[in-house]
Image: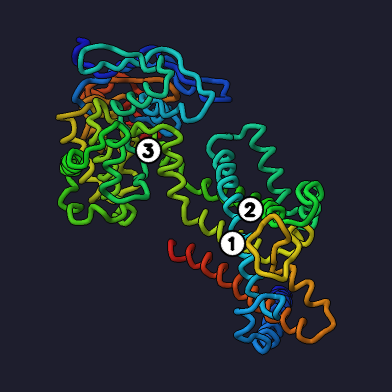
């Protein structure tokens, strides 16, 4: 009797917790959709921030995220390959692995401050490059850990079979092992891209923001997230509406990238 | 035993895994006859896989292992090489082209059937497309899997059944024309029908290569092999012609193991 009662209580409690969690999520999504969709107009996509649109912000945000990935993916993947294939429980490898895990949970504002001191202050002002570096610092540990974990799933027999056919270690790693882990690593890259494209803090005082359309990375660079932060604090209705629209669009982008990433895994299995 | 009949010869060979205090193999002496099938049997942990994996030095993938003694490989031109002396990457690659290996679980690479077989050939430096096609076809025929694969050479090898994958792996190894093929329990992950096909294939292969096979299956060893080595706790307990080992073993231990009294 007691057992059944306890079971019921736990069941109710856990269901309740799930409902609360999901409830808030849907609340956010519903508010965002309602306020966002009603605030979106054609001109939102065709005009730059200075004229009440977000065209330059979208382009700017994507430019920085893509360039940050171009920096972080090769570095992160090579580090991951080192940890799994060459490190072999060496002290250096375990130190790097731990540091990378710590970096993954480093507050993003701290990374922003660090890059400010490194690339903004000495060069006399906010610039797009600093934003890219800040984003890639956020991304590298995620890529390292994904690569490391995905390579760990490749059976060691596959490596041995490659070696047994007369392959050298680096050829086997590049041509077979990484290929076998391709789907997992790609998913990790997509998910980490989704993560950094929504980041504000690392950009806040690195690339800052720009109202105009620009591709010049040496100056202040347009950012969707920083704009949302700014716009939301403005007193006028139009700015706040634009913040809602931008938030909604950003959420949809992140959601889509996440779904693509998850779908890729499922499709493979 | 006359030397010209041997393809490999293991002499006073001891092996210690990295970090282990005691050797896993102790002073093993074992001849491998050319164009014959040698089976290695023994209870789990007796060192038979360890010995097999020493014969193409796959152990060297992991650092810190210790070899002692000699493992001689007799080449086609009659020269002899102690494979434990190998230090350079190029020589390792040559060794593995001469001494191929098939694993317990099929290990198809994540690429097409054709590319799987061509992989080792390409590594050995064959680039010419028509030559590759000819050699791949020959290898697939040699592994009795050509009829099943000829219409789907460009499909992924991961879509094949376990038995087909294992024969593909054999084709991949045969393509390099090795002198010796090492089989590490090649059928223990397969169903009886696939097992039969693989056994038949191994029996045919000995026309061209010398085979060493580790197996837990006594029937398989007795059906397939010409010579049998019984290993126990890191020692070679008994080695002889297969009939002798199975019908009239010298050692009590061998008899007990073969008749299933332990192991």
| Residue B259 relative to residue B17: left or right | left
Residue A206's place in the image compared with A22, above or below, is above
Tell which subunit mark 1 falls on: A
Where residue B186 appears, x then y in whole percent?
A: 31, 40
Residue located at (68% from left, 51% from top): A133
> Residue tagged by mark 3?
A161
| Neighbour tally class for label 1: few under 14, some 14-19, many 20 plus, Cα within 10 Å | many
Mark 2 / mark 3, whichever is N-terminal:
2
In the picture, the disc for residue A191 is: 1
In the picture, the disc for residue A269 is: none
Where residue A218 appears, x then y in whole percent?
A: 69, 55
Question: Can the viewer see residue B83 in this picture?
Answer: yes
Residue located at (21% from left, 12% from top): B78
Tell which subunit mark 2 falls on: A
Assign a secondary structure to mark 3. Answer: helix
Where residue B262 appears, x then y in whole percent?
A: 40, 34
Assess whether mark 1 and mark 2 are in contact (beta carbons under 8 angstroms).
yes
Tell which subunit mark 3 falls on: A
Mark 2 / mark 1, whichever is N-terminal:
2
Query: B132 or A241: which is nearer to us?
Result: A241
Assess whether mark 3 and mark 2 are in contact (beta carbons under 8 angstroms).
no
Residue A211's place in the image compared with B171, above or below, is below
Query: B223 or A71: which is nearer to us?
Result: A71
Question: Can the viewer see residue A18 in this picture?
Answer: no
Assign a secondary structure to mark 2. Answer: helix
| Residue A199 relative to residue B177: left or right | right
Where residue B159 appears, x then y in whole percent?
A: 31, 57
> Residue tagged by mark 2?
A142
């Amino acid at each position: 009797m007691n057992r059944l009662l306890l079971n019921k209580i736990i069941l109710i409690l856990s269901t309740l917790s799930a409902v609360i969690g999901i409830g808030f999520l849907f609340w956010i999504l519903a508010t965002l959709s309602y306020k966002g969709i009603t605030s979106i107009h054609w001109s939102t996509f065709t005009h730059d921030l200075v004229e009440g649109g977000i065209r330059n912000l979208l382009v700017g945000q994507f430019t920085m995220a893509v360039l940050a990935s171009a920096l972080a993916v090769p570095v992160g993947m090579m580090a991951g390959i080192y940890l799994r294939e060459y490190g072999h429980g060496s002290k250096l490898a375990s130190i790097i692995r731990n540091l990378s895990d710590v970096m993954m949970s480093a507050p993003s504002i701290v990374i922003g401050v660090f890059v400010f001191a490194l690339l903004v202050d000495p060069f006399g002002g906010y610039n797009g490059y600093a934003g890219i570096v800040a984003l890639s610092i956020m991304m590298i540990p995620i890529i390292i850990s994904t690569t490391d974990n995905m390579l760990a799933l490749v059976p060691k027999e596959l490596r041995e079979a490659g070696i047994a056919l007369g392959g050298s270690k680096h050829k086997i790693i590049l041509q077979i092992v990484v290929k076998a882990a391709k789907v997992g690593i790609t998913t990790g890259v997509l998910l980490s891209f989704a993560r950094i494209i929504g980041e504000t803090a690392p950009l806040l005082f690195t690339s800052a923001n720009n109202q105009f359309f620009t591709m010049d990375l040496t100056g202040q660079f347009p950012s969707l997230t920083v704009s949302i932060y700014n716009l939301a604090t403005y007193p006028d209705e139009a700015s706040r509406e634009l913040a809602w629209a931008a938030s909604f669009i950003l959420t949809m982008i992140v959601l889509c990238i996440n779904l693509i990433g998850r779908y890729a895994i499922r499709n493979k299995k | 035993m006359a030397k010209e009949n041997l393809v490999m010869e293991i002499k006073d060979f001891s092996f210690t895994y990295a970090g282990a205090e005691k050797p896993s193999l102790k002073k093993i002496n074992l001849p491998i006859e050319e164009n014959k099938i040698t089976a290695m049997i023994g209870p789990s942990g007796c060192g038979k896989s360890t010995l097999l994996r020493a014969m193409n030095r796959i152990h060297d993938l992991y650092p810190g292992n210790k070899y002692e003694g000699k493992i001689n490989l007799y080449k086609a031109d009659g020269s002899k090489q102690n494979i434990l002396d190998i230090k350079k990457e190029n020589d390792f690659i040559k060794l593995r082209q001469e001494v191929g290996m098939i694993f317990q679980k099929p290990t198809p690479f994540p690429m097409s059937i054709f590319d799987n077989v061509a992989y080792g050939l390409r590594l050995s430096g064959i680039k010419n497309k028509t030559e590759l096609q000819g050699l791949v076809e020959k290898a697939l025929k040699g592994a009795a899997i050509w009829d099943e694969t000829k219409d789907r050479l460009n499909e992924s090898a991961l879509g094949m059944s376990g038995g087909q994958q294992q024969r593909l792996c054999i084709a991949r190894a045969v393509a390099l024309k090795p002198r010796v093929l090492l089989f590490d329990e090649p059928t223990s992950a397969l169903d009886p029908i696939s097992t039969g096909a693989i056994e038949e294939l191994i029996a045919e292969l000995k026309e061209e290569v010398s085979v060493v096979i580790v197996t837990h299956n006594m029937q398989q060893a007795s059906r397939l092999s010409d010579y049998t080595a019984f290993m126990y706790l890191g020692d070679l307990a008994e080695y002889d012609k297969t009939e002798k080992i199975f019908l009239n073993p010298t050692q009590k231990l061998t008899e007990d193991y073969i008749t299933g009294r332990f192991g």
